[in-house]
Amino acid sequence: MERCPVCRASFKGMPVCRRCKSDLTDLITLEKQAKYRMMQAVQQLQAGNLSKARQLCSSSESLQRTDFGAALLGFLDVLVLEEKRSLEDMLWEYGKDI
Ligand SMILES: [Zn+2]
């Protein structure tokens, strides 16, 4: 969050907006959860768990949309699709020999 969603004042990390005094605690909590899930998504990606990574990334994006999250989600969609396709290819190859 770079600006207060109510008055657009720049956000300085305080739980109450310095200009309009809106309570931003819930938004800060959501933002933290989103960042945490995105971090977990990257860890799952590094571990090679693509579908788990995609699930966490999508969950993070539903809390807070970011350019990074959108890009990662698009990237994971391609990887998950390719993994599924290569699995189908492998099963098809295997099926031929039976
Ligand atoms: Zn404000």
Image (spheres, rainbow, N blue to C red):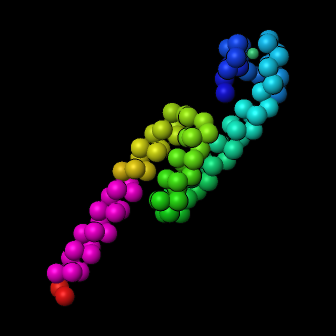
Q: Is 78 drawn above or below residue 98 in the view shown?
A: above
Question: Against 63, is 84 above or below?
Answer: below
Residue 29 percent coordinates (x, y) = 75, 38
Left or right position of 76 against 84? right
Q: How many marks?
A: 0
Please identify the quadrant where the N terminus is shown.
top right
Pick the quarter of the image with the C terminus: bottom left
Within the displayed image, which quadrant is ligand 1 positioned in? top right
Residue 76: percent from the left, percent from the top? 43, 51
43 or 33, which lies in front?
Answer: 33
Q: Residue at x 69, y 44 (%)?
A: 33
Question: Magenta: predominant secondary structure element?
Answer: helix
Q: Is residue 74 above or below residue 16?
A: below
Give the magenta-colored segment's residue range.
Answer: 79-96
Seen in the picture, residue 27 relative to 76 is either above or below; the reply is above
Residue 13 visible in rendering: no
Q: Going by the image, does 72 lie left or right of 29?
A: left
Residue drawn 57% across and 52% down?
56
User: Residue 59 location in percent, x, y?
Assistant: 57, 47
Residue 66 belongs to magenta span: no
Q: Residue furthest bottom?
A: 98
